[in-house]
Amino acid sequence: MKIKSIIIYCSISSLFLFSLTSIWKILATLQGLNIDNFNFQTTFFLGFIISFIYLIIGSKINDKIKSFIFAIIFTFIEGYLIQSLPIWYNVGIFLILYFFTSKIKKYNIKYFNEEYSSQLVFFEFLTLFGIVLFSFVILFPFYMMLVTSFKTQIALLVNPLDFSIDFNQDLKDLFKSYFVIFKTYKFGKFILTSSIVSIGTVIITLIFAIPAAYAVARLNFFGKTFLSTSILIIYMFPAIVLVIPLYTVFSQLGLRNSIEGLLIVYTATTLPVAIYMLQGYFKSIPKELEEAAILDRQNWFGIIFKIIIPLSLPAISSVALYVFMIAWNEFLFSLMFLDNPNSFTLSRAIQYLSGDAETPRQYLMAGSVIVTLPVLFYICLF
Amino acid sequence: MNDSLSKIEKRTAYILTLPAVFLVFAIILFPIFANIWISFKEVGLKDIRIPEPRAKKIIKSISEEPSKIKVIYKLRNSSLIQEIRDIQFTDKIPKNIEPLNLDKRCKFISNKIKCNFGNWKAKYREKFEVILKSTDSTKILKKDIKSFKPVLTGKSDNILLNTKFTLKNFKKVLFENDFLDLLLTTFYYTFFGTVGSIIFGILTAQMVNQKFFGRTFMRSVLLFPYVGPVVALAYTWELLLDPNSGTLNSLLINFQIIENPINLLGQKYITLNFFGLDLKLRLALTTVIIFEIWRYFPLAFLFILARLQAIPKDLYEAAEVDGAGPIKKFINITLPQITAVISILFMIRFIWNFNKFEDVFLLTGGASGTRTLPINVYQQGFAVSDIGMGSAVSIVIVMLLLIFMFFYFKLIGKRADEN
């Protein structure tokens, strides 16, 4: 039982080590190193032995010295003897090994006397593995987007694996794609349109949603339950179903290709969720405050402005952020309603750019970086 | 006293909610009914533009007669298919100027030329000339004349408003264009996208629910695909998966995993050899589903994480005392606690994925076996320019969704009764 657990543990930990080094190798390849093999056998074997020796040594030697020695040995064999790769690659391997050994130091022989120890080990390594893998899988496309926007057309075609950025070149050359999309493709205008539409949507949505949410949260009136349930159902309703009738009506009213048209549609589609989120928060505000305000002869306008809004600023700002993101990222309606480049939003402009097969990809990616950055910035702040 | 208070309360409530309700009804509920109306009509994209009578004003001076000037109106019917009836024309002229030999159809009243042009057929064009003369023989300035713009009004049939109905669109939707294949593709896309995103949501939520270094950062990183603009992400993926110079194919070739590049977004089928069995996999559809999962698992992650953090710790401690291992704990404690969230998530994601348009449109445009129902709405309505057909497809979508929701709630309701 114990031996089985130990073997399972050693295999899992070495698999984990293998996945770490593999990701490092992929990243190194993308920086122009010529690596064409993951060296599964060597890595697995070394990882297995290191895990096993760790178990046997236990805490007889100081942890830091132990980690250091093993990391050096592994790096020497893997990076120098077998493949003879540059020093920065080996530093990376060394750090990975140091991290790995500091993770496995808590296991010792006693640990495997316990029941379910192999299951526990499995889940612990799965978590670690998941964190590394998910970060890689999620961040990689974003990283690629950013790097591609700094490359030239030729560099992209010659070696699609070269993801290094040449910082020695002129700043003007480095940011060439950005200059081009602003100058030739007039991205400044699209950014302005997108900002006006999204910020406008936020403001109008809040103006409509705060009173409505207050009424749903606090007042008694006929049709209240109907309203609060239909809000959610409407929120689920598919945008693609709305497109054709809205298109016909908007073209007859002359609202296509106009910011006003977009504002109306965006506000209507974000209102249900804004009301739903706000009324949930408004319900949590103590009623006594409003009762005091009523005694002070405040009307509903005063109550909303002097009590509800100041007290629910955090909720309002998160709703504002959410609505902003929806409006900023929206694509379907801007695709349908806008066909005049003068009124394009950013998303629509990028899609329009890509419609031309001649457009170099680095311009497309520079546009993508511009449209993505604000959103990621906000989500990190939040 | 109390009565009047509650009346005031009601009135206030209506004042507060009406603007929002009105807007939502106008933009969301009205189109749903309009869809039903349009889907029973034969309407093309070109029919929905309202025909307008138009006039372009051109001013020409007459040589050696500065007190006279010639105005040419180029009149036309903007529509290529519809007649405009009862056209009224009005144009203003500055003071002290009057028209000479005015056309029979027109009258000159108080500085205005008013004409009744009658009916114009489709594509109608006419050059209409008026010669103006100043009453006091002074020179007429061109810009004085130009500062006024002619106004034309007319009546025309609106094809959308007549009461001619047909079942042709539905017949076409259901019996042509491979409806079954369309339905199946949509179902695969929706179902696997939903299930995949929920599974990854559970995995990541479990992961982040433990303490580790950089946990808050990890939480925001996990949200990136969900909050990023779909346009940017889809094009990045397209670049990543490109068969000729895409990074993924180059990497796989470099590490000798594959020999020839695979066109992940442009190939309909791929044959996989699985223990001697040849399996045909819909490649482009699978890629699109993977993108779908990648982009939408964060929503499941958020929902499930919130639920996981609300599970009382003593449950796990009690299970530990009973000698349960991690797998048993997950199956017997965690799963039952999150089933409610998962069933809500399943419904939300199923409905949304069923109607997802942008992702597939941007990645493949509906080519190579990825044509789903929403893509079909767009293709019928805007690529083939048949608005009626597009509407009919969206009605089919709504019907299918209603059927799904009906069965889903029946199932969920039964479950709730049993518990």
Image (cartoon, rainbow, N blue to C red):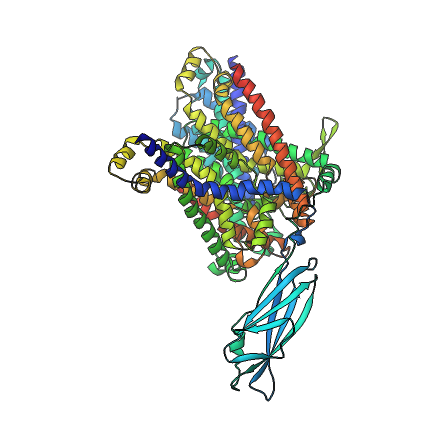
Q: Looking at the picture, how far across and down is residue B376, in whole percent? A: 67, 42
B262 lies above or below A255: above
Residue projecting furthest to the bottom: B64
Q: Is residue A27 visible?
A: no
A179 lies above or below B235: below
Residue A103: name its quadrant.
Answer: top left
Q: Where does the C terminus of chain A fall, quadrant-wise?
A: top left
A206 lies above or below A150: above
Give the tally of numbered discs.
0
- Name the residue located 47 percent from the left edge and 51 percent from the top edge: A197
Toward the viewer: A175 or B412? B412
Residue projecting furthest to the top: B322
B383 lies above or below B314: below
Q: Is residue B15 visible?
A: yes
- Name the residue located 26 percent from the left edge and 39 percent from the top edge: A297
**Left or right: B408 as drawn, with respect to A374:** right
Q: Looking at the picture, how far across and down is residue A298, in whole percent? A: 28, 40
Q: Looking at the picture, how far across and down is residue A2, in whole percent? A: 51, 13
- Name the residue located 43 percent from the left edge and 27 percent from the top edge: B210
Toward the viewer: A236 or B216? A236
Residue A305: name its quadrant.
Answer: top left
Toward the viewer: A23 or A75? A23
Q: Looking at the picture, how far across and down is residue A220, in whole percent? A: 38, 31
